[in-house]
Amino acid sequence: MTIDERLEALTHNLELHAGFQADAEKRQADAEKRQADANKRHDDAIARIDRRLDRAIRLSVLDARRQRNRNIEFDEKMTQLAAALQGLIDAMRRGGNGN
């Protein structure tokens, strides 16, 4: 093989390598773009989940406060009812017509 033939073969191989390198760089750039898109979708999803969790926690706290107030009101009414019933029982024990 002559020097010119060797040079031609090396030049051809370098051109092939350059083409392969360019294809690899394009594939890498495409992969990076897809990864960036996936990261964006992931970040958006996490942000939506965070907002939903924040809202759910806020509503849970409000509901717990309301329930605590309802329980206090219920306890007060039950205490009043128990006192009224006790008064009725006491009145019935005393007998008579209530005079």
Image (cartoon, rainbow, N blue to C red):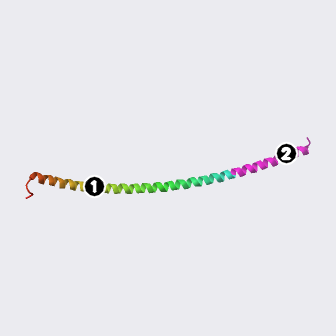
Task: Identify the residue at the far front of this view.
Answer: 97
Query: Based on the displayed image, in which of its 4 quarters is residue 80 positioned?
Result: bottom left
Q: Residue furthest right?
A: 2
**Residue 86 image offset from top left, x and y in percent:** 16, 52
Q: In the figure, is residue 73 to the left or right of 20?
A: left
Q: Residue at x 82, y 45 (%)?
A: 13
Residue nearest the viewer, comparing 1 with 89: 89
Residue matched to label 1 = 74
- Residue 96 at x, y = what percent? 7, 55
Q: Tell me how far mark 2 sits from mark 1, CA to CA.
A: 93 Å
Residue 39 horizontal side relative to residue 93, left or right = right
Magenta run includes residue 16: yes
Q: Give the crowd class for mark 2: few <14, some 14-19, many >=20 residues within 10 Å.
A: few
Residue 72 is situated, as x and y percent measured from the top left of the image, at 28, 55
The magenta region covers 1-28
Secondary-structure class at tag 1:
helix
Name the residue beneath numbered marker 2: 10
Q: Quadrant of residue 59?
A: bottom left
Q: Main secondary structure of the magenta part?
A: helix
Q: Give me the residue at 22% from left, 54% from top.
A: 79
Q: Quadrant of the C terminus?
A: bottom left
- In magenta stretch: residue 19: yes
Residue type at mark 2: give it: Leu
Depth check: 98 or 71 in front? Answer: 98
